[in-house]
């Protein structure tokens, strides 16, 4: 990860701007967000055996600065040869509306919620996903807390829409 930031000094920014860019990149490409992306790509299976129509639940941390969890309900929708088709509908919720976090050096709180839909193709012989598609929509507010240049709290409406596709191939 440090190698990712090594070329930033050549962009001509002052130290304060470089620090803010690095912090923003760490939130996007930091250890927690990468870990959350990998958790999302790998399906968490139940302890019981599955058949077509079976369903189960799991809970994942969104891996962002915001304290969000994703509560998924999975379903094994079909098995075709060595591939199983899985679908999940998820609810995205703020786990702690009073938790403070940093955004570009400012303290903030969030109140966000939304929905997520996933479709995955999984190898039935080893359980490894070969493809995962994720659509999510999150809406709510982030409140920048008073301090520094902000004399009072400032509520910022937010909408985050994402569409991701993970393709996993053995080399």
Image (cartoon, rainbow, N blue to C red):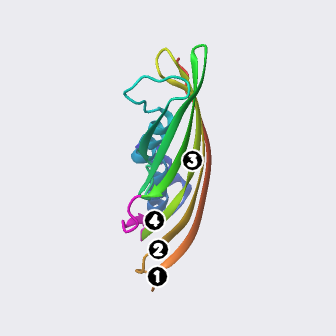
Q: Nearer the viewer, mark 4 or mark 2?
A: 2
Q: Are marks 2 and 1 in contact (CB under 8 Å)?
A: yes
Mark 4, other Cα within 10 Å: few <14 / some 14–19 / many ≥20: some
Q: Are marks 4 and 1 in contact (CB under 8 Å)?
A: no
Label 2 vs label 1: CA separation?
8 Å
Label 4 vs label 1: CA separation?
13 Å
Name the magenta segment's main secondary structure: loop
Magenta region: 95-107
Which badge, 4 or 1, comes first in the chain's sequence?
4
Which badge, 2 or 1, comes first in the chain's sequence?
2
- The residue located at (41%, 80%) in the rendering is 148
Helix, strand or loop at mark 4: strand
Q: Position of residue 26 (x, y in %)?
A: 44, 52
Mark 1, other Cα within 10 Å: few <14 / some 14–19 / many ≥20: few
Q: Which residue is mark 4?
A: 103
The part of the image, by quadrant, that contains residue 94 is bottom left
Q: Which residue is mark 2?
A: 144
Label 3 vs label 2: CA separation?
26 Å
Q: Which residue is mark 1?
A: 150
């Amino acid at each position: 990860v440090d190698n990712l930031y090594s070329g930033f000094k050549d962009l001509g920014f002052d130290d304060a701007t470089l620090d803010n860019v690095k912090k923003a990149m760490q939130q996007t490409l930091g250890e927690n967000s990468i870990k959350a992306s990998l958790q999302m790509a790998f399906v968490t299976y139940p302890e019981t055996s599955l058949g077509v129509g079976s369903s189960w639940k799991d809970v994942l941390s969104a891996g962002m600065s915001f304290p969000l969890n994703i509560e998924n309900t999975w379903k094994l929708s079909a098995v075709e040869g060595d591939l199983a088709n899985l679908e999940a509908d998820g609810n995205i919720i703020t786990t702690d509306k009073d938790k403070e976090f940093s955004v570009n050096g400012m303290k903030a709180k969030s109140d966000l919620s939304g929905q997520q839909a996933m479709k995955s193709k999984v190898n039935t012989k080893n359980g490894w996903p070969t493809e995962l598609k994720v659509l999510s929509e999150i809406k709510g507010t982030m409140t920048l807390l008073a301090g520094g240049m902000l004399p009072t709290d400032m509520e910022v409406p937010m909408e985050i829409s994402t569409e991701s596709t993970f393709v996993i191939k053995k080399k």
